[in-house]
Structures are given as structure tokens and as C-alpha cells.
Image (cartoon, grey):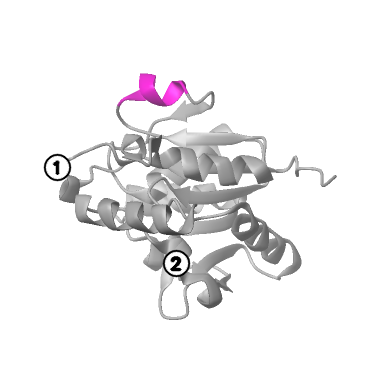
Amino acid sequence: MNRKPTNVAGVILAGGLAKRMQNADKGLVTLNGKTLISYVLSALSTVLDEIYISANRNEVNYTDFGYVILNDPILNFSGPLAGILSAMYYTQAEVLLVAPCDCPLIKAEHFTAMLNKLTSGNCDIIVAFDGERLHPVFLALKTSLRDSIATYLNQGERKVENWLKQHNWKIMDFSHDKQIFTNINTYEDLAAVELLFNGEHY
């Protein structure tokens, strides 16, 4: 039986405004009778015991999942880095795994691959790559970077890619499995993924 690492925490980012979904709380939107965040929690909880949910609204609903709910430490709805920073402030872990709440095809093996690469590689951050572009909200990174993120956000910056360029990072190539990055940005996306689930029995 594989033992879960104790020096690693995870955070699922559910703090966005989802403007293209009429400001719906995407983590609580249902797909095949389950909330979107449930799929990500299922994958991440297979790898880790210490998990946080970054949410800026509907905290009571998220509490029902049984995990600590964290709010952005600087300004509400100030982007993914604010949610990452809130987890870094809260945890004592040395490494943080990060995922968005709206990618229901992600599996435990993908998180494990990112974590293993960070452990074995000479770098501070692993960012997911689909063969064509980066997915900067899928990260494995060292929590010692918290002050760097705080400084960056306090300067009024938000873009994750620009912050990454300040550090020693490497990619985790998932080009062989790029469908895991299918995310739900619109209700049309939701309908398309529901068809995929029904056809492939996810």
C-alpha cells in the first residue's frame, strides 16, 4: 500500500467569478449528478490527506465536503495566485499541489506524476503542459515561494505565467493525455463534457 506524503498539501481553486457562466459558482455546478469540484477532490484525495478549498463565496456549501475552506488573503477574486497564497499561509507542508475546480477529467495519476517530477527535478515549480500550451493552474510548487507571490500580488500583478518566469520551473508534459485539461467555462462546455462522460463512463 502506498503511503500518502505528509509534507505535501493540495489546494483546489474555486474562487473565480465564472463570468461566462452568469457568475455561477463553478465548483458547485453539477455534472452527471456530481459537483465539478467532487471529481477533482476524488482525484486529489487519493494522493493527499491535507487538502484545502479556496473559495470566496458559498463557503457553507463547500464546508459540506469536509475540508478547510480558505479565502483570498489580499483581495477577493484576485486570481489563482491569491488562492495559492492562502493555502501557503495556512499549511506547514513544504510542497503544494494546485488544481482548478472545473477540470473533472483529472486523475490521481496526473497529480502523482507532477509531484514525483518536482521531487526528482532540480526546480521549484512544475507546471502542466499539454504539448501546445501551459496550464498554469495545474502546479506542484514549493511553499517557500509564498513571499514571492505576496510581493507580486501586492504590486498589482496577477498573471501566473509572468510570475512563473521569475523562478526555476519545469514542465510536466501531458501531451499524451491532453483531454485532462478539458475545463468547464460555459454551459455549452458542460453539455459537451456530459456527453463525453455518458459515452466513456467516467
In the rendered image of this protein, does residue 60 appear above or below residue 25? above
Residue at x 47%, y 62% (from the top left corner): 180
- Residue 58: x and y, percent? 31, 25
Q: Residues within 10 Å of mark 2 (few under 14, many from 20)?
A: few
User: For the residue labelled by badge 2, is the local secondary structure a helix, a strand or a loop?
Assistant: helix
Query: Which range is magenta?
Result: 58-64
Q: Is residue 154 above or below residue 28?
A: below
Mark 1 is on which residue type? Gln
Who is closer to the viewer here, 106 or 192?
192
Find residue 22 and name its label: 1
> From where the camera sits, is residue 156 visible?
no
**At label 2, which amino acid type do we have?**
Gln
Residue found at the far front of this picture = 199
The disc placed on residue 179 is 2
Q: Residue at x 34, y 51 (%)?
A: 194
> Is 61 colored magenta in this rendering?
yes
Residue 70 visible to an observer of this rendering = yes
Q: Position of residue 190 (x, y in %)?
A: 28, 51
